[in-house]
Amino acid sequence: MTNRIRYHTIDNSPGFWAIFVLFLILSAIGLGAAFYMEHHGHWVTGMSQNVVWGTPHVFAVFLIVAASGALNTASIGSVFGRKPYKPLAPLSALLAGALLIGGLAVLVLDLGRPDRLVIAMTHYNFRSIFAWNIFLYTGFLVVLLAYIWTMLDRNVKAYSTPVGFIGFLWRLVLTTGTGSIFGFLVGRAAYDAAIMAPMFIAMSFSFGTALYILCMLAIMVGNGRPVGDELVARMAKLLGVFVAGSLFFVAVHHLTNIYGPETRGLEAFLLLDGGIYTSLFWLGFVLLGSVVPMVLFFHPATNRSFSMVSLGAVLVVLGGLAEIYVIIIGGQAVPQVLFPGYEVSSSFFDGSVAYYAPSWPEVLLGISGFAMAFLVVALGVKVLRFMPHSLADPLVDAHFKGKADKARGGDAAQAQTA
């Protein structure tokens, strides 16, 4: 007797169509918010001449960074040869592409003049990191399509490992480019740092894996398909390592700025006197977004609980949004040092903290990015065979030695096929 993973599309159910319609409505609301801001002008938002990247950019950057990390599971299976992760690979690639589409949709709709994207796609300034990212984002989508093809079509399945390796390298370069957008901005003390690139890579591992766990559990459990406790514990511990790595790089970034005399004032603002930015960093990212999830992911009493692991993943996502908000909005709100060593005062608010409060159109547009991404995932799992019929432990891991399969959503007998 041998175990074999079978893949199936998602069955028709009232719950699936209810969620599908919900994502469709949220996407439409986001498009309406974008039209409202486009029609009335960006003065209806909280943005100003000081804070030119608002809440939609927070959501867009988060989704783009998470798209890179969502491919972690597929990379571990294909590139590093870990067989327990191979059944999870198709959904991993689908989610990566969906998150990138959602993030880019928000980014384009927040430009103020989306039609100018044509100029950005036909006229390139290769001294700008934004021009590089045009190729990185579109290239990543092409690699993902090829990767999905090799996983779903048995005729080209032999190419899945080399294509997966290309995807692994490409996503590292992609996230490096996204982090370099901030790292190359020498005019902002909060951004100008080489560590931005590896820090964004570490955060991508954390954000993407958290969204993958939530998506995988929602689809499998929601459709009554078994998921093994050992598999969930393995994924939880992996996410815990990524969260610890993300927290480490963020700490190094701040410690480096504290060490430099020219950035101590910046760190005092963000870590001590920044009001909402300080609260979001310490309470949102550090405590609720990192420490609490790590406890849930590593403690044996909670890392096999679907509800506790899902709670930890949700906290990682919310903490990640808080950290990106602090980086993007807080980095613009802090006063720019135009002339080091001198005090600057004028009628243009030089030397003062920039005020910013998100408006409802901005928030709705940002949320619609998640809705668009999950809408793509819902369409994918409905039309193509991305999801395994079972992820029970004996099927996923050939070395599983448990006395009985504790898979949720079905009996152990349903998890084995001749």
Image (cartoon, rainbow, N blue to C red):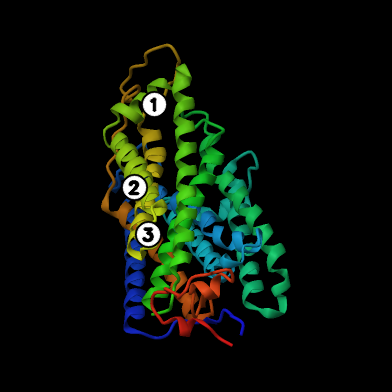
Does label 1 or label 3 sit earlier along the sequence? 1
The amino acid on which the numbered mark 2 sits, given as a three-letter code, is Val
Residue where numbered disc 2 is placed: 292
Disc 2, SS: helix
Task: Return the residue at label 1.
Answer: 267
Seen at 48% across and 19% down, the residue is: 260
Residue at horizontal 59 percent and vertical 42 percent from the top: 129
- Which percent across, then down, holds residue 301? 35, 57
The percent coordinates of residue 36 (x first, y second) are 31, 57
Residue extending farthest bottom: 418
Disc 1 residue type (three-letter): Glu
Q: CA distance from mark 2 to mark 1?
A: 24 Å
Q: Position of residue 134 (x, y in %)?
A: 59, 52
Residue 198 falls in image quadrant: top right
Q: Position of residue 173 (x, y in %)?
A: 62, 48
Observer-side mark, 1 or 3, equals 3
Q: Amino acid at mark 3?
A: Val
State the separation of the CA atoms marked 3 and 2: 11 Å
Residue placed under numbered mark 3 in the picture: 309
Answer above or below: position of 246 versus 271. below
**Secondary structure at numbered mark 3:** helix
- Quadrant location of the N terminus? bottom right
* Front-most of residues 116 and 102: 102
For label 1, the SS is helix
Q: Earlier in the sequence, mark 2 or mark 1?
A: 1
Q: Earlier in the sequence, mark 3 or mark 2?
A: 2
Please report contact status of discs 1 and 3: CB closer than 8 Å, yes or no.
no
